Image (cartoon, rainbow, N blue to C red):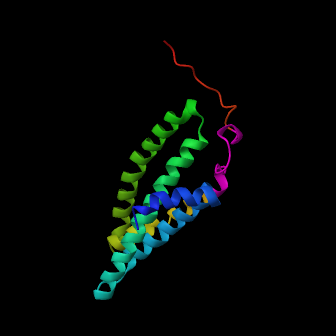
Amino acid sequence: LAMGMYALAGELSDRIGRRTLLAVFYTLHAGITVAYYLVPPGVVGAKVVIVLWTLRVAVGMGTGTLVTTLGSEVFPTAHRATAQSLGQVGASIGKPAGILTEGLLAPVIGGHWNATAFTMCFQFFVGLIVMKGFPETAGKELEDIGWTSAPTHEAKE
């Protein structure tokens, strides 16, 4: 299931749109992850965790496909490497900040599982940001997306 999500995400994004599907996947990923961390312990809980983990990984893989595709289509070639580098800088700052936030919240809201579930709730807003802040790129030529007028920086020899 999870490995097939790479291809399924690409196919679905061609049909219903990358922006829409990415927003749905971010929302699904957040919901599944919150549910995963809040499953009560026990035999039934263990079986639910297996299902939720598989779904979480599958949706995460699909999300990765869509982020890569949308990112490569939204930014013009002259700025794509810079945009991808800034994404990595954001991830390098965001991941430790998330870990720090979770650690500070854990004693306040009842443990690490609850704190992790709480921090994942912010991912729901990412879907809204994608829907409101990004153009739909599926079915369009790169020149028609609207970034062709962006200034370029020529490489100096």
Whether the magenta-drawn stretch holds residue 135 is answered as: yes
Q: Which residues are magenta?
A: 131-146
**Residue 11 image point, x, y percent:** 55, 58
Task: Identify which residue, 138 or 32, lies in the foreground.
Answer: 138
Q: What residue is at 32 percent from the left and 87 percent from the top?
A: 44
In the rendered view, would you say 136 is above or below 115? above
Q: Quadrant of the N terminus?
A: bottom left
**Residue 16 image point, x, y percent:** 64, 61
Q: Is residue 86 visible?
A: yes
Q: Can you tell which quarter of the image residue 41 is in? A: bottom left
Residue placed furthest toward the top: 157
Count up the numbered dots.
Answer: 0
| 130 on left or right of 43 | right
Task: Identify which residue, 7 or 29, lies in the foreground.
Answer: 7
Q: What residue is at 48 percent from the left and 58 percent from the top?
A: 7
Q: Is residue 110 visible?
A: no
**Residue 76 image point, x, y percent:** 60, 35
Task: Identify which residue, 140 or 76, lies in the foreground.
Answer: 140
Q: What residue is at 49 percent from the left and 72 percent from the top?
A: 31
| 86 on left or right of 144 | left
Q: What residue is at 44 percent from the left and 61 percent from the top?
A: 60
Q: Main secondary structure of the magenta part?
A: loop
**Residue 110 image point, x, y percent:** 35, 76
